[in-house]
Amino acid sequence: MPAGTVFLDTTVFADRFFGGRDARREIDSAISGHTVKSSGYVREQFRATFLRAAVMVHNALRTTPDPAEVLLQTDHFAFFQKGEGVKARKVLSNLLRHQNSNAEAMLVTLQRLVEFDLMSSFDRLATLTDDTKCCQCPDDPKADDNGIYRFSKKCTLDDPRPCAIKEFWQKRQVALTVLAAQPTAHPEKTRKAAAEVVQGKPARGQRCFVHLSDAVIVAEAEPNSTLLTSNTVDFNPIAEAFGEGRTVVGYKTP
């Protein structure tokens, strides 16, 4: 790992907290002795994915106190976007590793994760910048009288959040223009979204948290830093397009 600052992608936090032993060891080795940074945008992305996953597992286990049955239910966890079942299974696997299928103990741990432990662990791992002022999940999870958590994600064109993503990309128009013009290095949805933002269309909504999310994270990493991620395939060409000496480094996942 090159010396200097290491900037952490969302996948790093996910695998550091819920991944296999080898991934956790690689991450710890990669960040040891370095200045470790991330961003408010990554934090909100983590809340919108893995904190939501913990909420969904908790709610399912609260109504069906059978971990094996909840595991089957995760195939249908797609309340907001694809992949939520995969994230929920990572949370559930981590619980089973420590609680041995004891539903009552798992619920206690999940409640601590949802209300405090998960995000406090996130905050201890890295110093955060906050150029985007991202607020995908404006409210914290709240439990109703039956112990079921409500936790909503709000980031749409119709009901814009008070973020700074428009100003963020206005400062980086040159990099975004280069990204939009690359013919083969990126998924079509990424190139299309970059071109739309350059042309003046709103940068919020899915253009932000889906199609240009990797680009936001690369742009947030300071020049000449190392960006640690499990997704080197998508991040490498973006870092190349943006320039400024960022190095993308990956690690193995199960």
Image (tube, rainbow, N blue to C red):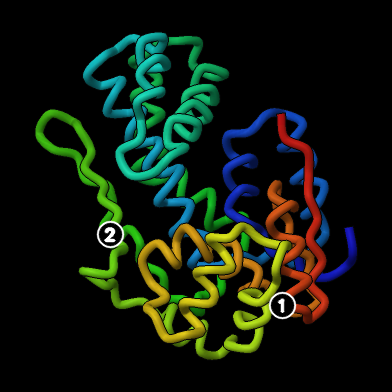
Residue plotted at (39% across, 23% down): 74
Q: Quadrant of residue 148?
A: top left
The numbered disc on residue 234 is none
Identify the amino acid type marked 1. Answer: Phe
Mark 2 falls on what kind of element?
A: loop
Q: In the image, is 50 to the left or to the right of 182?
A: left
Q: How far apart are the two marked residues, 1 and 2, measured between alpha carbons?
A: 29 Å
Q: In the image, is 190 to the left or to the right of 227?
A: left
Mark 1 falls on what kind of element?
A: helix
Of the residues tagged 1 and 2, which is closer to the observer?
1
Identify the amino acid type marked 2. Answer: Lys
Q: Are there few (<14), some (14-19), or many (20+) residues within 10 Å of tag 2?
A: some
Quick check: can you spot residue 164?
yes
Q: Which residue is mark 1?
A: 242
Which quadrant is the C terminus positioned in?
top right
- The answer to whether 209 is drawn above or below residue 143 in the figure is below
Q: Position of residue 104 (x, y in %)?
A: 33, 15
186 and 225: which one is in front? 186
- The answer to whether 213 is drawn above or below residue 87 in the figure is below
**Most distant residue in the right direction:** 2
The numbered disc on residue 154 is 2
Q: Quadrant of residue 180?
A: bottom right
Quick check: can you spot residue 127?
no
Q: Position of residue 1 (x, y in %)?
A: 88, 57
Q: Are there few (<14), some (14-19), or many (20+) residues within 10 Å of tag 1?
A: many
Circle 1/circle 2 CB separation < 8 Å: no
Residue plotted at (27% across, 28% down): 59
Residue plotted at (40% across, 51% down): 48
